[in-house]
Image (tube, rainbow, N blue to C red):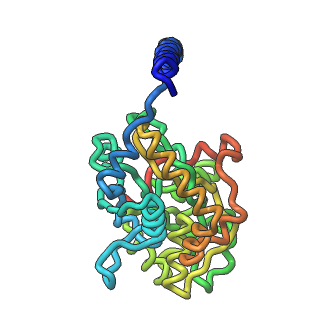
Amino acid sequence: MTKELMFKFVQKIAGLAIYTGICLGVVGATSPVLAEDSSLGIVMRRGHLRVGIDAAIGGPYMFWNAKTQFYDGFELEIIQEIAARLNIEPRPINIPWTTQPENLASRQVDILLSAREEGALETGDTKGKFIETTAYYRSAQRLLIRADGTQIKSLRDMIGKRVGVVANSGGAAIAETYNKNRGNAIRLFSSRDLDRMVIQLRDRQLDAMILDEPVAVWQVRNNPNFIIVGEPLIPIRLVAIVNKDDISLKKAVDKALTEMRQEGKLEQILKRWNLWESQKTLKSTKVLPVTVLAIITPYSAYQ
């Protein structure tokens, strides 16, 4: 190539660069490209995901395993799988359930995965502060009885019976609403001490309990004298929670959960904890009547 041709070529390239720069400037002025938030990048650079959990919730959600000297439960396995798919380490941080939202808001943790019901934080002081991931489980309330108490098969059969519920739980809401409409037909016993009530059921001081499905399944698994009866009541999705501005982190967790569902990994985890069967039939509360939704409480049963 001659010097003259080289000079003309360089002129064209320079002109094209100037023209492109002007066009980009115009486009930038009229249609700015919004940069994605840095939440995922921060977690990736740190190399671990700080997850707010509460081991006091108990099995099979999350609990302290004395044999392994570490946390255990189906939620822990879900946390570990999400972290593995992001190629980082999971770091569960044990925080009392009631204070978890403020710990998330102050960024002491990156995410909450701790028996959080869909829409539960969209009320009161927490409204508008957080966003939810895609659901990883659909829970419900179930009737737990002794195997010799098979005459109880529904709420109607509990009239006159001694029924235990965990204070401020979905089960408590169901029983209290039923009593309100039926003149205190159920002899209701409410407590925060789940273990004590399980003993009372075993020792015939209670006739039945209304519990979160995973907890009821866990009790049957550990006590062959208990059985679950009746239909699932008030099914509702469980979700993880992140701060409202952490869109990139939410997208990454959503992607991981979606892949887990599509690849059968979520099914594998839930089957290991005897929690998969109900996932085929339970419907979300999104399709339930407003009158039914009104009795759901946004608080954990195990504080």
Please determine whether, in this image, residue 251 is positioned above or below residue 192.
above
The residue closer to the viewer here, 104 or 213, is: 104
The residue closer to the viewer here, 18 or 244, is: 18
Circle count? 0
Taking the image as shown, residue 221 lies to the left or right of residue 263, namely left
Please tell me in which quadrant of the rendered image residue 171 appears. Answer: bottom right
Q: Residue at x 54, y 80 (%)?
A: 220
Residue 162: x percent and y percent? Answer: 53, 69
Taking the image as shown, residue 89 lies to the left or right of residue 31, namely left
Residue 149: x percent and y percent? Answer: 62, 81
Residue 14: x percent and y percent? Answer: 46, 17
Q: Determine if residue 208 is in view.
A: no
Please tell me in which quadrant of the rendered image residue 36 appears. Answer: top left
Q: Quadrant of the C terminus?
A: bottom left
Q: Determine if residue 163 is in view.
A: yes
Taking the image as shown, residue 54 lies to the left or right of residue 295, namely left
The residue closer to the viewer here, 127 or 175, is: 127
Residue 24: x percent and y percent? Answer: 50, 18
Q: Residue furthest front?
A: 2
Please determine whether, in this image, residue 218 is positioned above or below residue 33.
below
The residue closer to the viewer here, 148 or 222, is: 222
Q: Residue at x 33, y 40 (%)?
A: 105
Q: Residue at x 40, y 40 (%)?
A: 243
Q: Residue at x 67, y 71 (%)?
A: 277
